[in-house]
Image: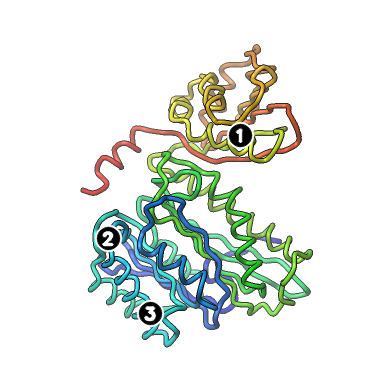
Amino acid sequence: MKIIEGGITAANGFYAAGLFAGIRKKRKDMALIYSKVPCKAAGTFTTNLIKAAPVKWDMEIVKLSPYAQAIVVNSGVANACTGRTGIEYCKEMAEAVSLNLNIPQESVLVASTGLIGKQLPMDKILSGIENLVPILGNSLNDGTMAAEAILTTDTRKKELALELELGGKKVVIGGMSKGSGMIHPNMCTMLSFIATDISISKELLQEALSTDVKDTYNMISVDGDTSTNDTVLLLANGMAENPEITEKNDDYYKFLDALNYINTYFSKRIAEDGEGATSLLEVNVINANDKEQARKLSKSIITSNLTKIALFGHDLNWGRIICAMGYSGANFNPEIVDLYFESVAGKVKLIENGVEIFYNKELAKDILSAAEVMITVDIQMGNEKATAWGCDLTYDYVKINAAYSS
């Protein structure tokens, strides 16, 4: 497996485009992804009881349609809490893509991100679709244009591509993602689209995605809010012509490793691009009794506002970390916990067997001042581990969200 240049258009047979349709002010706001042949499709979606219209639409397509071939995305308006009209607008978007690309309506997936409660400006949406189709391309720049068009409060695009060999054939996985605010474990205001030319059964494609999401997108938090629009879509068009993966053999696990790499990459990029963030926080809980215990503890730490604020202030208040562990719901013995801070500045141990030890406080502050900070918690109960990602909580987060709808 190796990283290659590219994103959503890197895999054979995938095309993309992005443009300004007038939904937002002076920023690209619509994207289209297309495969020249039908794809197996898998998806995972928000756990919020309130689900946006495109989430409901996609859940039906992924479950019931034999294949998918296109994804149309808009930013600026979420199409959430929009009633029957919102679903009708999803249908209109799918119909427009269907007519312009000459593919079945039930093969078109839809995604939206932006302000909740507003109806889509369908005149601009439909015009945008008509203008996207003629400019579809498979170059690196075409993929980048699409990656830029799905952003909201993000400060940078997020795209990646990998190449690996399966069954003697070169296979490529590429993708693009967005997310900056309303980010919380169990998905977030994030969209992630992954395209691969692998040949694999629909059942195993879905299982691979559902399995991997537990340790990637579901392990990030920016602000503790779980969105109405979270969507991860994975398309596989089979054009690599590798022997079709229909069982959990070596090729399946190689694919799973590659999928994990790309999803982990996007998870970290989303966390570090949290609204107003200045630092990426990675929390590793090691030597846990089981996986679920490690997940609960690591997620509790990254979602603690006091921990996030301490990171922003480079404050060595490790008690906030231990406190967050204590209300996580996971059972552990605080009297045998070891805790470490680490970054490019170095590594320091602050707690041993639940008690603070002597450590270099200046070094510890330097560690917390880095752009990426790692907290490792050793609970000394077993052999399992889990990693979660978050960011600091800054003044700018409040400023951005105080003025979001205005």
Residue 126 in the image: state x and y as whole percent.
Answer: 28, 76
Left or right: 70 with respect to 91?
A: right
- Name the residue: 41% across, 33% down: 393
Q: Residues within 10 Å of mark 2 (few under 14, many from 20)?
A: some
Left or right: 150 with respect to 260?
A: left
Quarter of the picture containing the N terminus is bottom right
Is residue 285 positioned above or below 247 on the image?
Answer: above
Depth check, mark 2 against mark 3: the one in front is 2
Circle 3: element type: helix
For marks 2 and 3, give the CA distance.
Answer: 21 Å
Of the numbered discs 2 and 3, the one sitting upstream in the chain is: 2
- Name the residue: 56% across, 79% down: 13
Using the image as rendered, state which of residue 170 and residue 108 is in the foreground: 108
Circle 1: element type: loop
Which residue is disc 1 drawn over?
344
Which residue is disc 3 drawn over?
97
Circle 2: element type: loop
Depth check, mark 2 against mark 1: the one in front is 2
Which residue is disc 2 drawn over?
82
Q: Residue furthest bottom?
A: 102
Of the numbered discs 3 and 1, the one sitting upstream in the chain is: 3
Q: Amino acid at mark 1?
A: Val
